[in-house]
Image (spheres, grey):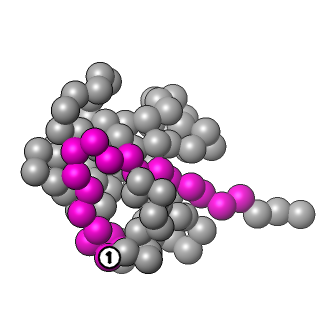
Amino acid sequence: MNTSEGGVVGEVTVLVPRLLQPLVDGREELRFDVGGGASVEELLDAIGSEFPVFERRLRDETGKLRRYVNIYLDGEDVRRLAGLQTNASAGQELMVIQSVAGG
């Protein structure tokens, strides 16, 4: 599973929020070749191998999503599906949303 710049059949697109873009070389999206599919967990593992600081902002030490991070697969919250075991297929879009709080 490698990231690529262009849109090729067989890829899942991961949309990166502006706040986290500096952690992925300023990119707005990452593309991963998934062939027959990959779980959200496998996609996060692939991101972590290339961008470990970005991945640590999404998951805690146990590998679970941080409570202020939401991930949507084609508009569906993965927590309401099969969590990190949710399967992503070619052509789907994974959107990362990090909550920001303050006062």
Q: Secondary structure at mark 1?
A: loop
The residue to which callout 1 is attached is 82
Instruction: Work out whether 27 lies above or below 89.
Output: above
Looking at this view, is 70 or 44 the one in front? 70
Residue at screen point 57% across, 44% down: 17
Residue 80 image position (x, y, % from top left): 44, 77
Residue 22 appears in which quarter of the rendering?
top right
Q: Residue furthest toward the top?
A: 6
Q: Position of residue 101 (x, y in %)?
A: 76, 63
Specify whether residue 83 is painted magenta. Answer: yes
Marker count (numbered): 1
Residue that sits furthest to the right in the current view: 103
Range shown magenta: 82-100
Give residue 103's quadrant in the image: bottom right
Q: Is residue 40 left or right of residue 96?
A: left
* Label 1: few (<14), some (14–19) or many (≥20) C-alpha neighbours in 10 Å: few
Q: Is residue 24 above or below residue 49?
A: above
Can residue 50 be seen here? The reply is no
Q: Which amino acid type is marked by label 1?
A: Ala
The reply, left or right, for residue 40 in relation to residue 60 is left
Q: Nearer the viewer, residue 51 or 78?
A: 78
Farthest residue, direction left: 36
